[in-house]
Every structure is written in structure tokens, then in C-alpha cells.
Image (spheres, rainbow, N blue to C red):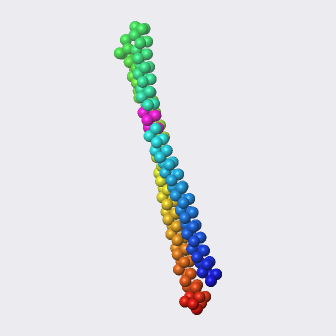
Amino acid sequence: MGGVISDIATAFTARDAAGVVTAANDRSIAELGRQNNFENLAAGDSLIRGATAAANAQMRGSATQAAQRVGYANSGVDESVGTPSQVAGSTGVFANFDAQTAQNNAIREALGHKEVIARNTFQQGQLAAASKANYDAEMTKGNLALAKAPLDLFSAGTFLGG
């Protein structure tokens, strides 16, 4: 009779263990989901900041070109030819370069956030698979123990009043 009680205890212990591991993995999966939401928001934010920084770089470049034109006009220099024209052109090129650099940096930052999301999603899949495998194994162990209990009763001679 002790074997039957032991089998039943094993069955319930196995089922409890399956539930504990599954619950822990479910909490980890949920936490990774929350991190993914944060990372997604951070990626969008970095793109917005990049666009803003690019616009600011363009405005600074335009302001510098305007200041150059005012300086040339005050000096009586014709700004449409020669060195003043080249300086204005170079200022515009560097303003565009600064704007593109700001956008590229923002895209790289957003891609970093997306990479974290991809890793978290992969880890969620692994946890879910491990949780299911553990649950299935523990439930099988518990079911086998329960299936063995009547055999233990029968072999002990207590089945059917024996």
C-alpha cells in the first residue's frame, strides 16, 4: 500500500513541479514582452530624435550661409562668384553631411533596439518551448505514476478484496 501512496505523491509532485516551472517561464516571457514594448518605443523615439537633429543641422547650415551672405554684403563683396560662392556651397554640403550623419546615427540606434527585440523574441520562444517540454515530461511522469498505482494495489493483493 505504501507504493500506491508513493505513486500518487509522485504524480502530484510532478504536476506541481510542472506548474512551478511553467509559471516561472510565463513570468519571464511576460517580462521579455514588456522589454520588447519598451525597446520598440525607444527605437521609434530614436528615429524621431534623429529627424529632429537632422532638421536642426539643416537650420544651422542655413543660418551660417545667411550670416556669410550678410558678412559679404556688408564688406561689398559679390557673393555670387568666386570664393564666397564656393564657401557658401561648402557650407551647404557640410550642413547636409551633418544632417545625414544625425539620421544615420538615429537609424543605427533604432536597429540596436530592434536587435534587442529580436533576441528577446528568440528567448521567449526558447522559454516557451522549454516550458512546454518540461510540462509534458512532468505530466507524463505524473500520469505514469498514477497509472502504476492500480498495479501496485493489485500486486499487493488488496485489489478486489484479495
Q: Position of residue 138 (x, y in %)?
A: 54, 70
Which residue occupies the foreground of this view, 110 or 133?
133
- Residue, x 59% and y 88% (percent of image)? 158
**Could you tell me how many numbered marks the image carries?**
0
Magenta highlight range: 46-51
Is 49 a magenta residue? Answer: yes
Name the residue at the right extreme. Answer: 2
Q: At 52% across and 73% down in the image, what residue appears?
A: 140
Question: Can residue 146 be seen?
Answer: yes
Residue toward you, 41 or 152? 152
- The quadrant of the picture occupied by the C terminus is bottom right
Residue 103 visible in the current orientation: no
Q: Is residue 77 left or right of residue 146?
A: left
Confirm whether the magenta stretch covers residue 85.
no
Q: Quadrant of the N terminus?
A: bottom right
Along the viewing direction, whichever of 136 and 8 lies nearer the viewer: 8
Quarter-wise, where is residue 99 in the image? Answer: top left
Chief secondary structure of the magenta span? helix
Q: Which residue is located at x 40 percent, y 14 percent?
A: 69
